[in-house]
Image (cartoon, helix red, strand yellow):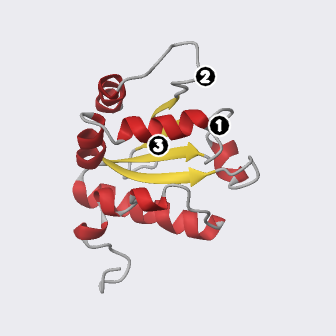
Amino acid sequence: MSCRRGRPRSSECGPRLEPASEAWAERTDAELAARIERAMQCGRDRQTRVLLEFTAPWCADCREMMRIEGEEPAKSVLAERFERVRVNVRRWDAHRALVDRFGIRAIAAYVVLDPRSGSVLAQTTREPITGADGRLTSEQWAAWLRAAR
């Protein structure tokens, strides 16, 4: 954390804010709120958007989305344009207030926030394995992310 009160260093933003090693981290509501606030500050500093990712380790679609997000071009788009915060809903028993606030009914779900106003800019649910739309590619996911303004 930065020595300056309340402001993360730019080296703590982008991909370092939510490393892949913490993909399924179980956080308290307070820890998650702090992570989201840090992402909002990073977004203001870097002029990026905040991407809330509602996931769970038991969800096959969530695991597939993680794979897709690790491939180009989605990987670069995420690193350059977003501050990511993963919300592990566990078995739908965690972070209920946030789930309800955004109307999340299925995962993997994504919410793009404006870091200045906190308003929702875009929202989607991706089901690349179980959904009717068939396999999602990294190119398709990157295109949606680029358009989420």
- Say whether residue 12 is visible: yes
Q: For the residues marked 1 and 3, what is the alpha-carbon distance in whole angstroms?
A: 16 Å
Tell me where residue 27 appears, x and y as whole percent: 61, 65
How crowded pointer 2 is (Cα within 10 Å; few <14, some 14-19, many 20+) is rated as: few
Tell me where residue 105 appears, x and y as whole percent: 69, 33
Q: Are marks 1 and 2 in contact (CB under 8 Å)?
A: no
**From the image, which quarter does the N terminus lie in?**
bottom left
The residue lying at 55 percent from left, 64 percent from top is: 33
Position of 58 relative to 19 (above/below): above
Can you identify the residue that label 2 sits on?
130
The residue lying at 46 percent from left, 36 percent from top is: 65
Kindly report which numbered mark, 1 or 2, lies closer to the viewer in this rendering.
2
Position of 60 relative to 23 (above/below): above
Point out the tag, 1 or 2, that comes first from the N-terminus.
Answer: 1
How crowded pointer 1 is (Cα within 10 Å; few <14, some 14-19, many 20+) is rated as: some
Task: Identify residue type, mark 3.
Answer: Ser
Q: Is residue 114 left or right of residue 89?
A: left
Q: For the residues marked 1 and 2, what is the alpha-carbon distance in whole angstroms?
A: 17 Å
Point out the tag, 3 or 2, that comes first from the N-terminus.
Answer: 3
The front one of 103 and 27 is 27
Task: Identify residue type, mark 1.
Answer: Ile
> Which mark, by number, is residue 104?
1
Q: Are marks 1 and 3 in contact (CB under 8 Å)?
A: no
- Element under label 2? loop
The residue lying at 52 percent from left, 40 percent from top is: 63
Can you identify the residue that label 3 sits on?
119
- Say whether residue 120 is visible: no
Q: For the residues marked 3 and 2, what is the alpha-carbon distance in whole angstroms?
A: 29 Å
**From the image, which quarter does the C terminus lie in?**
top left
Kindly report which numbered mark, 1 or 3, lies closer to the viewer in this rendering.
1
